[in-house]
Amino acid sequence: MENAAGDFTEKLNEWGKAKTPFFFLVDYQFQKPQAWQLDELDPNEILFNLNGFSNDVALLRDELPEHIRFDKHPLSFEAYQAKFDCVLRHLNAGNSFLVNLSVPTPIDTNLTLEQIFRHSEAPYRLLFKNRFVCFSPELFVRIQGNRIASFPMKGTIDASIPNAEQVILSDDKEAAEHATIVDLIRNDLSMVAEKVWVERYRYIDRIQTSDKTLLQVSSEIAGILPATFDGQYGDLLKKLLPAGSITGAPKPRTLEIIQEAEDYNRGYYTGIMGYFDGTNFESAVMIRFIEQQEDRLVFKSGGGITARSNASSEYQEIVDKVYLPFSYAPHAVL
């Protein structure tokens, strides 16, 4: 696995320095990173649309069924609470300040992964060999010229809750969680940038789903890359990954806690996808993720846990994040 990571890093460094356009994927544990020059990509195998940069030339989208079926089968609250309590013990022992706990949720739908990809209105979308589809709202790192910026998302609320924006922005637990992530990302960026600052702090994004609107809290942290950077994108990713917003802080110990509490393989979920067009580099965190596992589909979702977290609220958040990424329901979502 070390060879795979090393080869990947060298490829991105070489292509970045030569200004050769590429597309890449990195799994959560950096064990199976993959990269392709853009002209090597087969759209029958991999389709992507990253904020408008796309290899999907299809002008017609498949018609959706008259009635969309989307059933989720989340683990029981009792099973979730056991994982939550494991995390809480570590938090109370001072082993971490914030742990991102995720779980797999089996789903049933009459849609194909390709239909979900094509009809999704998320800004960062990927269909990978009919093995998984990702429709992420979260930008990871954007590099334009010598400016690097990261955009962690931390904090979600149902927009139908009265005064939802005020509720989430004034929630002490959510504020502490977000501050922890912003501080972590500032520290991460300082490993690759010479000057780092918070450009925007706790702004609201609206995310439309097939059955509700969610409000998501984000921040923008920026920095200036050194003159010696010279397109070394492989080295940069190796230093920054895994993403702080889907792990927690401090990162090394928190990764161990996640492994103990989750007890399943995230795979490419919470990894990174991105591209370099020869000038600009942009990447996204692979959240909002449906994976084909043998004869069933599994939707992976998670949320940040702090010592102030409430198990039932966190459980509801991971269930709410299991959704179809459509801003409309053609007829009915069952």
Image: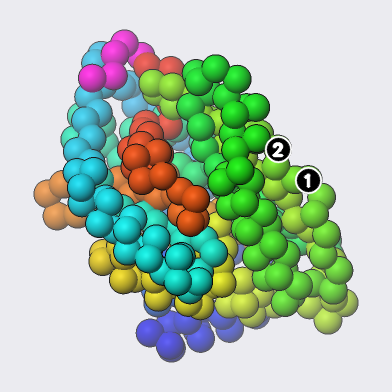
Quadrant the C terminus occupies: top left
Q: Is there CB contact under 8 Å for labels 2 and 1?
A: yes
Image coordinates for residue 327, horizontal then vertical, percent: 47, 22
The answer to which of 199 and 317 lies nearer the viewer is 317
> Which residue corresponds to the image point at 56% horizontal and 72% vertical from the top-left?
250
Which amino acid lies under the numbered mark 2 shown in the image of this protein?
A: Tyr
Say which residue appears at 43% left-offset and 82% top-offset: 4
Q: Is residue 147 left or right of residue 233?
A: right
Residue 311, visible in the rendered structure: yes
Q: Is residue 146 left or right of residue 75?
A: right
Q: Position of residue 61 (x, y in %)?
A: 40, 27
When the figure is inspected, residue 58 is found, relative to residue 78, above or below; the finding is above
Q: Residue at x 71, y 70 (%)?
A: 187
The residue identified by callout 1 is 200
- Near mark 2 (Cα within 10 A), the count class, few <14, some 14-19 or many ≥20, is some
Is any part of residue 270 visible from this angle?
no
Q: Mark 1: which secondary structure?
A: strand
Residue at the extreme top: 331
| Highlighted magenta segment, given as a residue range | 330-334
Is the image coloured rainbow, by chain, by secondary structure, or in one colour? Answer: rainbow
Residue 158 placement (x, y as % from top left): 48, 27
Instruction: Quadrant for the N terminus, please.
Output: bottom left
Give the dominant element type of the magenta stretch: helix, strand or loop.
loop
Instruction: Report if residue 141 lies within the magenta region.
Output: no
| Type of the residue with mark 1 | Arg
Q: Which mark is residue 203?
A: 2
